[in-house]
Image (cartoon, helix red, strand yellow):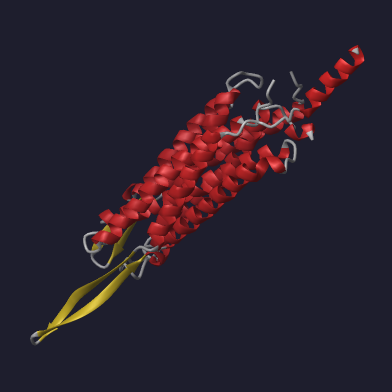
Amino acid sequence: MESITKARKICHLLLRFLAFGATLSAVIVMATSHEKASVLVFQFEAKYTNTPAFKYFVIGNSLVTVYGFLVLFLPPESFLWRLAVATDLVFTMLLVSSISAALAIAQVGKKGNSHAAWLPICNSVPKFCNQVTGALVAGAIAVIIYMILLLNSIHRVLDPLILRKC
Amino acid sequence: MASGNVEKLELSFSAVPDKPKKDWVLLSLRVLAFLATASATLVMALNKQTKNFVVATIGTTPITVSITAKFHHTPAFIFFVIANGVASLHNLVMIGVDILGPRFDYKGLRFVLIAILDMMNLVLASAGDGAATFMSELGRNGNTHARWDKICDKFESYCNRGGAALIASFIAIILLLITTVMSISKLKPKN
């Protein structure tokens, strides 16, 4: 049984807590973004539920938030860390695809698409666009931290320093 | 006499090569994943449809405008093509490493590198998928809140071909997931 030093334990816990905080803030910022605007005679409200991509982003990140919260309480030498490798992999994939989808739709909203005659909407609802950008930045940070955590959990389950065999 | 026998025994022990058994399951999975990603890339990259629209009628002659739908009109599809292209290249390189691998063995480092690269490949492929899925959903259904018209009723075969590329990419992701899990499990020391 290898001895995990106290510094490593704290570092790992801190990383998990940061990841949990990043996904939680992405969910909150995206869910509270809405703005009313009136263009010509139309009155429309921009909310995150207008687009399935943003809904997928919120649902994906909230799933990962719940998972991150549960993993925080896993004792360090438990047998379940092998399962944690697989679930970390799946949830990282979920995070990456949700942020990629939200980025794609946000890019259309900001720049429009001249070939399909889709006009950008960010000029009418700038506050909504800024909040969505903030949520996407938080999601990107969460993705990066989860990729580091994936490597970390593999390192934890398998014999550390496989390179020791060199 | 006895020492001669012992010598012969020792010689036979050292002469047995320590070759690991070739993993055919992993190799065939990688070949399938390569085929899936390559076909997704090709189908999306060659996706084009031209259609003539009647814009106005002056007198008796209608004025037609021909509009083309190509994959590089949307950044999401460009990213999809690039991501799947990189994924298929990675699968090709991994097949090469699997076949020629045991000749150049860097002790344990090779398996760690393969596992990490497989994970990055999986992440890239799933990112490309996510973007292209929601962009094509937007093209199929439009968005009434943002006043974005749907385009799939006018460009039917473009949308269908894009959908076929997406399905190939989904299959590729499942295969890549299984491959990644297998190459991570190979890191376990055999004891």
As displayed, is residue A56 above or below residue A7?
A: below
Where's residue A86, x and y in %?
54, 30
Residue located at (36% from left, 55% from top): B135
Residue located at (55% from left, 25% from top): A83
> Is residue B86 among the parts visible in the rendering?
yes
Of residues B75 and A16, which is closer to you in this image?
B75
Residue furthest out toward the bottom: B59
> Is residue A73 among the parts visible in the rendering?
no
Residue located at (28% from left, 73% from top): B67
* A69 horizontally vs A30: left or right: right
As displayed, is residue A87 above or below residue B117?
A: above
Report which quarter residue B116 is drawn in: top right
Of residues B127 and B94, which is closer to you in this image?
B94
Report which quarter residue B48 is drawn in: bottom left
Q: Identify the image quadrant of the C terminus of chain B.
A: top right
Q: Identify the image quadrant of the N terminus of chain B.
A: top right
